């Protein structure tokens, strides 16, 4: 019996022939994966809650490969959270560096003084170098030592270089004979504005970064009181910046500016008003009634301030300098996120060290002495936090 000849395979069945349908399917899968990743990173940026966070399938696989036990659920969530924030910070800095490079080209074409060109180049190096280290930290997120080292290097690069450059006096590098004294003063003022636009988001970003870091760590270790205390102590200092700006807005009688700055001023103060909720040891199941309720108030007033600022810009600003706005926002966002991640690493180590010292205290002879000291201070009313409520004066013990 003769076998019938095998029909030639169609091009779509040939393993060596590319299938347009499979290519489209692959592109669709990649787009879907990218969309899922972006959504996860955005949720981590907004919520920063390790108890409610979910890992991506790729992250689960990477952590399993790296040997992280599945039982360490919160620790795995912490590493994945760092990964998301680092990617956003790194990309934001790349955007800021690109717009700074565009500004540098304009400065060169205008034949501005060399010192301005030098300053802009150093700022670009700082942003590009920081983004390089931050993205390295994001890509090595399962290697704890590497990702922490690269994060700190990125933080140092982003902060140290601009502040060091700002210490260089500009006037000696200006040729006053060619420019004239008036033009020289104008140039110095321009450099001052440049320093302000670059350094201000870094300074302002420290406070919300610390607050975000502390509130995030409270979801990681809700039993600890220290994350809440850090947020409560930092919050009034952060509010002070907006209160000063609010006084200026009141004198300028700008309604939208007053609303925005008043909301931004009150937002961190809501944390102080919820001190007990934030500083009480709780379980994960109690976070809804403690941390999350306080955080919702913070986010609500921040949202009001942001809406008012956008409305102010839309109604008052006619000539938009889009590149400057994008550069400022990108730099500010990157600062907040980088500070959040870097300080989370540092604070977590400090909290652990403080916990160990506390355990040592409870097993030492100093515990009784400390209790006696606090008892005496409490008896005299020196430990009362709320001195405004009408309570009878405490009298010192006799003898």
Image (cartoon, rainbow, N blue to C red):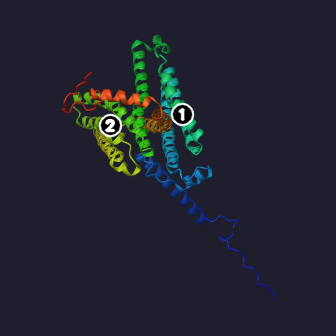
Q: Is residue 164 left or right of residue 14?
A: left
Q: Which residue is pictured at 51% across the width and 58% down the height?
A: 32
Quarter the C terminus occupies:
top left
Q: Does residue 136 appear in this view?
A: no
Q: How many marks?
A: 2
* Outermost residue toward the front in this view: 399
User: Which label belongs to residue 140?
Assistant: none
Q: Secondary structure at mark 2?
A: helix
Q: CA distance from mark 1 to mark 2?
A: 26 Å
**Around disc 1, counting alpha carbons within 10 Å, would you say few (fewer than 14), some (14 to 19), or many (20 or more)?**
many
Q: Is residue 290 left or right of residue 180?
A: left
* Outermost residue toward the right in this view: 1
- Residue 188: percent from left, percent from top: 42, 18
Q: Is residue 61 above or below residue 326?
A: below
Quadrant of res 134 = top right
Q: Is residue 136 above or below residue 171?
A: below
Q: Secondary structure at mark 1?
A: helix
> Camera-side residue: 96 or 241?
241
- Residue 212: percent from left, percent from top: 41, 40
Q: Which residue is pictured at 39% across the width and 34% down the height?
A: 230
> Camera-side residue: 159 or 146?
146
Q: Which residue is labeled 1 in the image?
A: 152
> Camera-side residue: 177 or 64?
64
* Outermost residue toward the bottom in this view: 1
Q: Which residue is labeled 2 in the image?
A: 268
Quarter the N terminus occupies:
bottom right
Tag 1–tag 2 contact (CB < 8 Å): no
**Around disc 2, counting alpha carbons within 10 Å, would you say few (fewer than 14), some (14 to 19), or many (20 or more)?**
many
- Residue 83: percent from left, percent from top: 52, 45
- Residue 19: percent from left, percent from top: 63, 66
């Amino acid at each position: 019996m003769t076998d019938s000849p095998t029909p030639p395979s169609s091009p779509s069945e040939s393993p060596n022939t590319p299938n347009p349908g499979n290519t489209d399917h692959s592109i669709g899968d990649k787009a879907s994966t990218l969309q899922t990743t972006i959504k996860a990173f955005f949720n981590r940026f907004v919520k920063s809650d390790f108890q409610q966070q979910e890992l991506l399938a790729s992250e689960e696989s990477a952590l399993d490969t790296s040997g992280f036990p599945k039982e360490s659920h919160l620790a795995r969530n912490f590493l994945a959270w760092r990964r998301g924030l680092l990617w956003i910070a790194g990309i934001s800095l790349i955007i800021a560096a690109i717009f700074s490079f565009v500004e540098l080209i304009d400065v060169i074409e205008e034949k501005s003084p060399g010192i301005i060109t030098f300053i802009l180049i150093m700022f670009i190096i700082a942003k590009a170098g920081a983004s390089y280290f931050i993205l390295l930290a994001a890509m090595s997120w399962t290697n704890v030592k590497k990702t922490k080292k690269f994060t700190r290097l990125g933080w140092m690069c982003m902060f140290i270089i601009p502040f060091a450059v700002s210490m260089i006096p500009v006037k000696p590098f200006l040729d006053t004979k060619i420019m004239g004294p008036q033009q020289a003063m104008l140039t110095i003022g321009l450099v001052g504005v440049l320093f302000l636009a670059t350094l201000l988001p870094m300074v302002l970003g420290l406070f919300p970064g610390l607050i975000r870091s502390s509130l995030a760590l409270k979801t990681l270790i809700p039993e600890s009181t220290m994350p809440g205390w850090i947020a409560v102590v930092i919050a009034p200092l952060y509010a002070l910046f907006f209160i000063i700006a609010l006084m200026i807005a009141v004198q300028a009688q700008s309604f939208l500016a007053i609303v925005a700055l008043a909301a931004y001023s009150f937002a961190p103060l809501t944390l102080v008003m919820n001190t007990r909720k934030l500083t009480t040891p709780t379980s994960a199941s109690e976070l809804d009634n403690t941390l999350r309720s306080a955080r919702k108030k913070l986010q609500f007033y921040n949202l009001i301030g942001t809406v008012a600022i956008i409305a102010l810009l839309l109604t008052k600003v006619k000539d938009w300098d889009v590149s400057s706005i994008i550069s400022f926002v990108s730099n500010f966002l990157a600062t907040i996120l980088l500070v959040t991640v870097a300080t989370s690493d540092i604070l977590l180590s400090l909290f652990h060290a403080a916990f160990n010292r506390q355990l040592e205290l409870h097993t030492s002879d100093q515990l009784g002495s400390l209790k006696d000291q606090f008892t005496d201070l409490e008896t005299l009313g020196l430990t009362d936090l709320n001195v405004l409520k009408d309570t009878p004066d405490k009298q010192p013990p006799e003898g």
